[in-house]
Amino acid sequence: MDAETQQKIEATVLEILEDADMESLTEHKVRAMAAEKLGLDLSLPDRKRFVRRVVESFLVSKAKEPGPKENENENEHENAKNDGGEEEEGKDDGGGGQEQREYDDEGDLIICHLSKKRRVTIQEFRGKRLVSIREFYEKDGKQLPTSKGISLTVDQWEAFRKAIPAIQDAIKRLEGSD
């Protein structure tokens, strides 16, 4: 992607973010709005990654800006964050620096590598957030997904996550019967 296109995309994304309701806006919506304004396909992997970086930089810069009532409401904000609210992406890893994120060639967030060929990613597909556990292969220096795997919606992931203790118990029982 050339520098001129990057500048246009960045300016448009920042304009959208400045005027947006940050409570209801998603990266997918920002990309769709910017694509419509610019008449460009921003779903291409390199453009998707670029928009994600612009959005993350914007969020980091906003987090560092002191608000007009920040000092007065600092304790209230800390209490609200700790009352079971959702954690934001890009949250500090507790080690003093920003958590390093890894993205695949499609711009999807890699959560972990299960093995050399398998990994867990978070992706957006047709406006839905998915947790994908998938096997990958290498072609021309790129890691590409195979059909071997599963993509779960957030609701399906939650149901699976809640079933993990029962799965662990079943594994222990099976191991004990050997």
Image (spheres, helix red, strand yellow):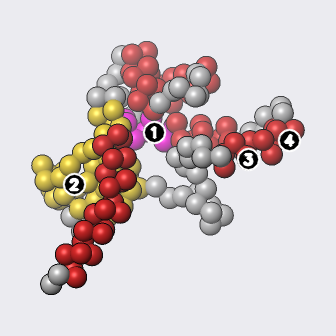
Residue at position x 31%, y 40% from top? Answer: 153
Amino acid type, mark 3: Glu
For residue 34, the mark is: none
- Look at the image and tell me whether residue 167 can be seen: yes
Spatial CA distance of label 3 from label 4 is: 11 Å
Q: How packed is label 1: few (under 14 Cα within 10 Å), some, or many (20 or more)?
A: some
Q: Picture coordinates of residue 146 (x, y %)?
A: 14, 51
For residue 134, the mark is: 2
Amino acid type, mark 2: Arg
Question: Which quarter of the figure is the N terminus placed in?
Answer: top left
Spatial CA distance of label 3 from label 2 is: 37 Å
Residue, disc 1: 52
Q: How packed is label 3: few (under 14 Cα within 10 Å), some, or many (20 or more)?
A: few
Examine the structure image and report whether residue 52 is included in the region drawn in magenta. Answer: yes
Residue at position x 28%, y 63% from top? Answer: 167
Q: Quadrant of residue 129?
A: top left
